[in-house]
Image: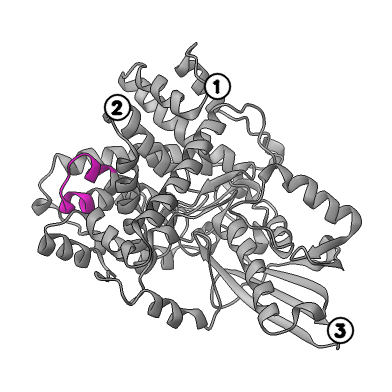
Amino acid sequence: MESISVFDMLKIGVGPSSSHTLGPWRAANRWIKIAKKRGHFKQIDQVTVNLYGSLSLTGRGHATDIAVLLGLCGFDPVSFPTDQIDSEIALIRENKTLALNGERPIDFDLEKQIVFNREFLPFHPNGIEFIGLLKNGKFFKKTFYSIGGGFVVEESRKRAAAKKEAFSHFPYPIQRADELLKYCNDLNMKVSEVVYQNELSLRTETHINKDFEAVWQVMLESMYTGCHTEGILPGGLNVRRRAYDTHKKLIRNTQYTNPQEWISCIRNGEVKFREILKWVSCFALSVNEVNASLGRVVTAPTNGSAGVIPAVLMYYMVIENHDANFDDVKQFLLVAGEIGSLFKKGATISAAMGGCQAEIGVSSAMAAGALTELMGGTPEQVLMASEIAMEHHLGLTCDPIAGLVQIPCIERNAMGAIKAINASELALDSDPKNAKVPLDKCINTMWQTANDMNNKYKETSEGGLAINVALSDC
C-alpha cells in the first residue's frame, strides 16, 4: 500500500509546471546526488540531457530546459531566489559553462546539450535522461520520470520499497476513500484528524506546524504578489495580467502594508455575490500569473492548478469566517492533501497522463472536500463534495497554447475554485445516503477516461486550443 504525506502533495517550488519544471529540476538534483554516491561526480567532464515525450513537446514553454540547468547547478527550487533565474541562465548561455552542483565548472552548450526528443518512452510520457561523460571515456546514465506534482521516479521504482517501509508505521494506512471513511466512522474522527495522526507518525507537531506555516506563507505571498503586479506575462502570447486590474477595482482605496493587513481590508469589503465571484477568481488568477512567470508557488497538487486551493481557502478566511486563523488553514490543508493523495494512488495527477482533469479536476476536488469540513460537513459530505467537483471535470483536456501554462490554464484555476465552492454547498445541503456516485467510483472513472483520452489532449500541445490558436493570433 502506497502511503503519501500531505507534504508530498503540497510542495513549495517554482513555476510554471510541477511536472515539467519542478520535476526535472529535482531529477537533476537527484542525478548529481547519485553520481556523488557512486563516486562518478568528480569524473564527469560533460553532461547531455535528453527530454522525451511531453517534456520535449511542451518543454520550452514550461521552462523545462531552464529547470534542468538550475538543478544541475545544485540550486534548491524551494529556496532559490526566483528573481535571479534570468541572470543565472544568461551567464550559462553566454559563457557556455555551468558549475556542476556549484562545485565543478564544466563546458555546457545548452543549445546542443539539452536535446528535445519527440519520442515517448514506454514507462511515462515525461521522461528525462542524464548522460555524464566520464574522464575514462565511460558514461554514467540515468533515466527519470516526472509523474506529476513534482514527483520524480525511476522506471524500476527502486525507491518504492524504501518509501513503503518509511510509511509502514502510518497508524491508518489509506488507499481508497471508503477506507478513509471507515476510519472516520470507527474512530469518530474528522478526516483532518485521521490524516493528522498519520502525519504525527512521520514528524513532530512542531515540525508539522512549521511546514504548514511555510506552505501557507507561500500561498498567501503568491496571491498578494499576483494581485499587486501588472504587465505582460513572458512567453510570447502577450497575455496581460488580469489579477492586478480586478484587484484594484475590488480593493478600491483601502490602505495596507502587508498581506495580513490586506486580509483584514478584504474582510471589511462588500460581500455581494458578484464581488465574491470576482474575489475568488482574482485569488486564483493571481497565483497562476505568478506561476506563469517562474514565480514561487505551492503544488496543489500541481503548479498548473496551484491557484484553486489558495483561492478557496482565502474565500473561507475573508468571506465565510472572519475569525479564521492558522488552525483553520492547517485543517483545510490536511483534508485537501489527503483527497489529492487518493487521486494520485487511484488515478493520476499528471496532465501528461490524464489531461487537465488530473490537475484542475483534482485540485477542485481537494478544495471542495477541505472547504466542506471547515463549514461543518461530515466525513461523508467531505467525500461527496470532492466527488461532485471531480465529476464535473471528467474528460477535461490539457491543450496549452504554445506549450505555455497560460491559456487556458490560468482561467481554469478560477473556474476550478468556483466549482469547488459550489460542490461544497451542494454536498452540505445533501444527505450523502442519497449520493449515487461514491468518490472511489469517480476516481476509477477518471483513470479510465485518462486511458481512453487521445494523447494530443495530454499536455502535448498537439490538439485543441493549442493548434487552433496560433501565436500570430495573439
Mark before the other along the chain sequence, 3 or 2? 3
Instruction: Give the dominant element type of the magenta stretch: helix, strand or loop.
Output: helix
Q: Are marks 2 and 1 in contact (CB under 8 Å)?
A: no
Report the span colored magenta: 371-384
Is 324 a magenta residue?
no
Pointer 2: what residue? 322
Q: Is residue 264 above or below residue 280?
A: above
Mark closer to the observer (1, 3): 3
* Helix, strand or loop under label 3: loop
Using the numbered discs, state the Cα–Cα distance from disc 3 to disc 2 in whole angstroms: 63 Å
Residue 135: assigned label: 3
Is 379 a magenta residue?
yes
Residue 248 visible in the snapshot: yes
Q: Quadrant of residue 314?
A: top left
- The amino acid type found where label 1 is placed reads Asp
- The amino acid type found where label 3 is placed reads Lys
Residue 245: assigned label: 1
Image coordinates for residue 424, horizontal then vertical, percent: 24, 42
Q: Residue furthest right?
A: 95
> Residue at horizontal 58%, vertical 45%?
296
* Helix, strand or loop under label 2: loop
Mark before the other along the chain sequence, 2 or 1? 1
Image coordinates for residue 440, horizontal then vertical, percent: 25, 64
Image coordinates for residue 238, horizontal then vertical, percent: 68, 34
> Residue at horizontal 24%, vertical 59%?
439
Q: Quadrant of residue 226?
A: top right
Image coordinates for residue 312, horizontal then vertical, percent: 36, 38
- The amino acid type found where label 2 is placed reads His
